[in-house]
Amino acid sequence: MFMSKAVSRLSRKRPPSEIHDNDVRASSSQQNATGTSKWAISLESLLEDPEGVKYFRDFLKREFSEENVLFWLACEEFKNIQDKKLLRDKAQQIYNTFLCSKAATQVNVEGQSRLSESMLAQPHPFMFQKLQEQIFTLMKYDSYNRFLKSDLCQQIKRQEESGKNSPDSDESVPKRASRIYNR
């Protein structure tokens, strides 16, 4: 089965046994998509774009569920840590911030009660994987769709379209000034 670049990058960080609904080759129009059109392809595409993540976080903050994307991002960062001490520190930070009963930004996932503090002493890069997948699924089937339909996303889309439709959008300011003043 062919995989798109986006899924390939994301799946490198996941155990190989997982199959995702985007495990097909992306069309060339999807590979060249930018901004809101790229974000609309999939939640994975949105989460790969720093600007998309910024707007998605703003949206989730308004919905009082920003902790979901923050947890997902923290887990992505956690998977890439090589240093054992740093891995242990980050595991404790993720647990304290998102999973323990006293966490101010606690995420609502099944199985967090099975994650004991004793497990934090011997962390491994995929120890939060199942919990991260739950949050991803929650975002994918709930907040992601609302984000795409939100006033915020629609406003960004209109701004992109008005910028692309402008006849001067590909011209530099000096070139445009020269063309205008030399008529």
Image: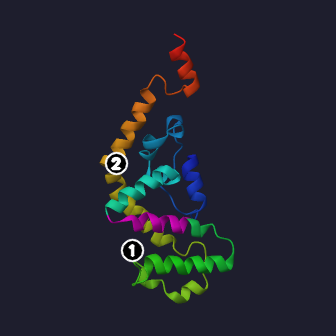
Say which of marks 1 and 2 sits in front: 2
Please tell me which of labels 1 and 2 falls first in the chain. 1
The image quarter containing residue 15 is: bottom right
Q: Amino acid at mark 1?
A: Val
Q: Residue at x 52, y 52 (%)?
A: 50
Kindly report the distance in space between the C-alpha atoms of the residues bearing marks 1 and 2: 27 Å
> Relative to 44, is 109 on the left or the right?
left
Residue under label 1: 109
Q: Are marks 1 and 2 in contact (CB under 8 Å)?
A: no
Q: Residue at x 49, y 24 (%)?
A: 168
* 91 part of magenta stretch: no
Q: Amino acid at mark 2?
A: Leu
Q: Dot 2 lies on which element?
A: helix
Can you say whether 137 is above or below 130 in the image? Answer: above
Q: Residue at x 51, y 76 (%)?
A: 94
Can you say whether 134 is above or below 95 in the image? Answer: above
Can you say whether 82 is above or below 25 in the image? Answer: below
Where is residue 13? Give x, y as percent.
59, 62
Instruction: Check the image and name the residue furthest to the top.
Output: 183
For disc 2, the neighbor class at 10 Å (few under 14, some 14 to 19, many from 20) is some
> Relative to 114, is 148 on the left or the right?
left
> Relative to 79, is 83 on the left or the right?
right
Residue 2: tell me if it is visible: no
Q: Dot 1 lies on which element?
A: loop
Residue under label 2: 152
Range covered by the magenta-colored residues:
64-76
Instruction: Check the image and name the residue furthest to the bottom.
Output: 118
